[in-house]
Image (cartoon, rainbow, N blue to C red):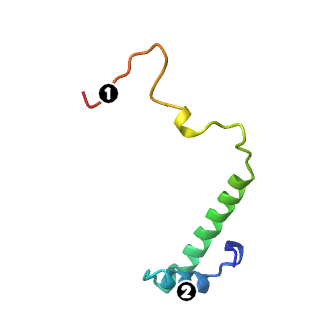
């Protein structure tokens, strides 16, 4: 089953299967949220990250030639 086909009753069954207590009134909202997440993930899967270095190659807090400040000090 894909998230495209997720209906409110199916959302309730999947929640129950996962051990989550979910009121019937929330099934439609959960199904809509799952559809939105699925659409975002689908777009991300289409992106080509082939030339992107791994995250360990980038340090957002370090700038060459600048003093580092630690807020805890």
Residue in the picture at 61% in, 84% down: 10
Residue named by callout 2: 13
In screen coordinates, is 43 left or right of 71?
Answer: right
Question: Would you call the spot at circle 2 few (<14 residues within 10 Å), some (14-19), or many (20 or more)?
Answer: some
Q: Position of residue 69 (x, y in %)?
A: 34, 23
Horizontal and vertical percent for residue 32? 61, 71
- The N terminus, quarter of image: bottom right
Q: Quadrant of the C terminus?
A: top left
Residue shown at 43% from the left, 15% from the top: 66
Residue drawn at 55 percent across, 82 percent down: 14
- Quadrant location of residue 40? bottom right
Disc 2 and disc 1 in contact, CB within 8 angstroms: no
**Image position, residue 56 (x, y; %):** 52, 37
Q: Nearer the viewer, residue 35 or 48?
A: 48
Q: Please tell me in which quadrant of the rendered image residue 58 appears.
A: top right
Element carrying mark 1: loop
Mark 1 Cα shell of 10 Å, populated few (<14), some (14-19), many (≥20) = few
Q: Taking 34 as reference, is 23 left or right?
A: left
Establish if 31 lies above or below 10. Answer: above
Q: Residue at x 73, y 48 (%)?
A: 47
Whether residue 15 is situated above or below residue 43 in the rendered picture: below
Q: Write down the residue under mark 1.
A: 70
* Lower sequence index among marks 2 and 1: 2
Name, please, the residue furthest toward the top.
65
Residue 31 in picture, x, y percent from top left? 60, 75
């Amino acid at each position: 089953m894909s998230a495209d086909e997720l209906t409110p009753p199916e959302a309730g069954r999947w929640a129950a299967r996962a051990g989550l207590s979910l009121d019937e009134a929330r099934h439609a909202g959960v199904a809509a949220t799952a559809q939105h997440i699925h659409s975002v993930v689908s777009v991300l899967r289409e992106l080509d990250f082939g030339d992107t270095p791994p995250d360990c190659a980038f340090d957002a807090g370090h700038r060459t030639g600048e003093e580092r400040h630690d807020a805890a000090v």
